[in-house]
Image (cartoon, rainbow, N blue to C red):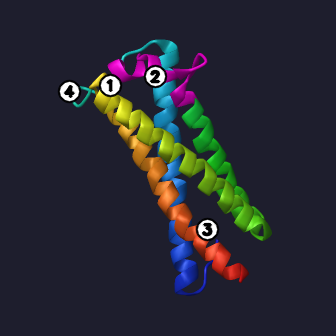
Amino acid sequence: MKFEGTAKTNEGYLWLISLIAAIVGLVDSIYLAWIKIADKTAACSNIGDCDAVNNSQYSEIAGIPIALLGAGAYLLILILLVLEQRWPQQKVNMRLGIFGLSLTGTLYSGYLTYLEIAVLRAICPFCVVSAIAIFVILIAGLFRLRRSLIDID
């Protein structure tokens, strides 16, 4: 990946930040999905109550663990990030997809965080990591999408 000039360098950094956040989110979500599916205890120590959150009624949608859905979203974001590098002519479409996924993920993470605090009264540090990762992707995605739309004009 070769970038020229400050704008291109910043764009490269934002792409890399998105990539790293997506990898962190994917690993985190896979771990939480494995904990849920294998009925294991999360390694939270005394930091939070992962089990209360991961075993709550809010941890699944139609029997599918939320963490598994999150892993799918992070995987899709990673695929779009890679495809963006392979097919630069589709850059705007890939960035729109990343923005849409990260916006949806951020809004849903906000809802889940509300449930953790207000309803369950338990915080899962791994869920917080995922919420931060998807939010970072959203913010980087906003800047990257803005740059793409400016380049079109």
Q: Earlier in the sequence, mark 3 or mark 2?
A: 2
- Which mark lies nearer to you, 1 or 4? 1
- In the picture of the structure, the residue carrying the numbered disc 2 is 58
- Which mark lies nearer to you, 1 or 2? 1
For label 2, the SS is helix
- In the picture of the structure, the residue carrying the numbered disc 3 is 145
Disc 4 to disc 2, C-alpha distance: 22 Å
Look at the picture and state if 108 lies above or below 153: above
The x, y position of residue 86, in whole percent, is 75, 63
Furthest residue toward left: 46
Amino acid type, mark 2: Tyr
Q: Residue at x 42, y 43 (%)?
A: 131
Magenta range = 51-68
Q: Earlier in the sequence, mark 3 or mark 4?
A: 4
- Which mark lies nearer to you, 3 or 4? 3
- Which mark lies nearer to you, 1 or 3? 1
For label 4, the SS is loop
28 horizontally vs 145: left or right = left
Amino acid type, mark 4: Asn
For label 1, the SS is helix
Quarter of the image for the N terminus: give it.
bottom right
Disc 1 to disc 3, C-alpha distance: 36 Å
